[in-house]
């Protein structure tokens, strides 16, 4: 058992109310939250939080982790050119061993930023699973197929293989996007979702061009088209939704879908600003992701929360466009639930011990007026003191406990990057 005491605690079980007391973990679960009792059991370790904040860890609800190898490689170009001229040709050179190495680099960044789970869509899923299991972090894989209906069999094979492979690994049905696949594939995925009673996820309405070309092909926007073929009978969601209108948001609300916004990536690629204010006010479920480290370029939940909040102010010329707390909820609880991780969404006895300790004494968080808003508007990854996943501390005070050193991981990726991009 591990005891945290003298802590501020943000459980996010009911809004953003903060209490003071202690939290205990027992194995991989939280066993107690409350005031200090008169008698204490024996603990393996006792951690004085020193008045700092314990809260649920961040959950990155959309990423392509192994794209760390293309971080800062292709800059100042729009999405279509970025993808087809700068990304796809180099991804064709990747091996399974490369993806494993580049995932490990991403995991260093996730843990240092307080992220304990990532929703990953990429090639060579076996490599991602291996990297996640060895590191102690959670990963939910999202199907990444594109092409034609024949590719649906590969999606089903991966789903059956990975859905129960490890307690910290999940799998969700998915495909890359409407514009990289045909109608046969879309309908095939819908049939698979019906057969398995499973949710489906995909990139959606990320750019105006993508959105309008789908309307030309199918007479409907991606969200409305997918609803018409029954793709979302069992839920799921879409990544981006930048060009959603009211009808698209209504589709998401009707089907209990998750709108996973990636503000930094959308801004960098000039794709636009997603209508998060409207989605929030209309009752659409929100989560946040970074997208891949080549289009962001960071895997930083603080930056996504900040941009998610302030870009809505700019979009609507309204300083009160969306509460900052909504972004904190989307980056933690929303991300967990979008990924199907309902056992580690909040802090509560019996929940998985996925939590972070934030240094409230850091200069950028002083003075302390409203902690949740401060985390969104002036917090940064440097404020993370500790990251725990499933009851195991994986990162603490700049040190990693994942079975390999940062120096080893970085040296390995440098050699691979030279080969791939040289």
Image: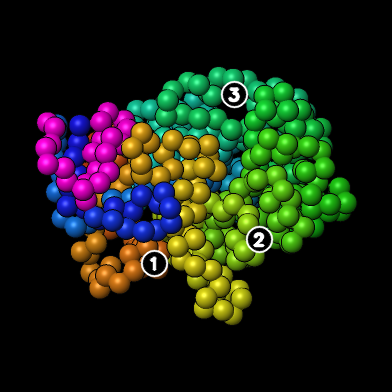
Q: How is the image coloured?
A: rainbow
CA distance separating discs 2 and 1: 22 Å
Q: What is the residue that sits farthest to the front in this orientation?
A: 38
| Near-viewer residue (121 or 147) | 121
Residue shown at 14% from the left, 49% from the top: 48
Of pointers 1 and 3, the one earlier in the residue sequence: 3
Residue marked by disc 3:
158
Of pointers 2 and 1, the one earlier in the residue sequence: 2
- Where disc 1 sits, the SS reads helix
Residue 31 part of the magenta-drawn span? yes
Q: Where is residue 80 in the image (x, y as percent from the top left)?
A: 67, 54
Q: Is residue 339 left or right of residue 369?
A: right
Residue 365 part of the magenta-drawn span? no
Residue marked by disc 1:
373
Residue shown at 16% from the left, 42% from the top: 37
| Near-viewer residue (103 or 164) | 164
In this view, the mark in front (1 or 3): 1
Q: Is residue 39 left or right of residue 367?
A: left
Q: Which of the numbered marks, if any, corresponds to residue 282?
A: 2
For the record, the magenta segment spans 21-42
| Near-viewer residue (70 or 289) | 289
CA distance separating discs 3 and 2: 35 Å
Q: Is residue 178 left or right of residue 260?
A: right
């Amino acid at each position: 058992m591990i005891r945290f005491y003298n802590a501020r605690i943000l459980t996010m079980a009911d809004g953003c109310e903060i209490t003071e007391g202690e939290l205990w973990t027992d194995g991989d679960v939280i066993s107690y939250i409350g005031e200090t009792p008169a008698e204490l059991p024996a603990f393996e370790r006792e951690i004085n939080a020193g008045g700092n904040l314990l809260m649920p860890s961040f959950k990155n609800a959309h990423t392509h982790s192994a794209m760390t190898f293309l971080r800062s490689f292709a800059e100042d170009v729009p999405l279509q050119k970025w993808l087809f001229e700068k990304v796809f040709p180099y991804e064709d050179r990747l091996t399974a061993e490369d993806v494993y190495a580049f995932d490990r680099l991403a995991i260093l960044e996730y843990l240092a930023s307080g992220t304990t789970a990532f929703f990953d869509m990429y090639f060579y899923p076996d490599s991602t699973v291996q990297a996640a299991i060895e590191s102690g972090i959670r990963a939910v894989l999202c199907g990444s197929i594109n092409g034609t209906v024949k590719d649906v069999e590969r999606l089903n094979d991966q789903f059956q293989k990975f859905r129960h492979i490890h307690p910290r690994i999940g799998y969700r049905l998915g495909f890359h996007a409407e514009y990289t696949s045909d109608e046969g594939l879309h309908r095939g995925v819908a049939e698979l979702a019906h057969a398995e009673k499973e949710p489906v996820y995909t990139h959606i309405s990320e750019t105006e061009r993508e959105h309008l070309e789908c309307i030309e092909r199918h007479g409907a926007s991606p969200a409305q088209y997918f609803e018409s073929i029954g793709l979302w009978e069992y839920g799921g969601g879409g990544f981006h939704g930048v060009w959603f209108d009211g009808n698209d948001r209504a589709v998401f609300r009707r089907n209990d879908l998750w709108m996973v916004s990636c503000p930094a990536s959308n801004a960098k690629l000039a794709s636009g600003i997603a209508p998060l204010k409207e989605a929030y006010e209309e009752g659409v479920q929100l989560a946040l992701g970074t997208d891949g480290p080549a289009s962001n370029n960071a895997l930083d939940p603080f930056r996504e929360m900040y941009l998610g909040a302030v870009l809505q102010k700019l979009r609507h010329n309204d300083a009160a466009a969306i509460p900052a707390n909504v972004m904190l909820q989307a980056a933690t609880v929303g991300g967990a639930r979008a990924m199907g991780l309902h056992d580690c969404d909040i802090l509560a006895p019996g929940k998985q011990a996925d939590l972070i300790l934030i240094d409230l004494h850091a200069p950028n968080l002083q003075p302390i007026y409203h902690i949740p808003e401060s985390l969104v508007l002036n917090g940064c990854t440097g404020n993370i003191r500790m990251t725990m996943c499933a009851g195991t501390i994986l990162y603490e005070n700049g040190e990693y406990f994942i079975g390999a050193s940062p120096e080893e991981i970085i040296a390995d990726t440098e050699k691979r990057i030279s080969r791939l991009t040289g």
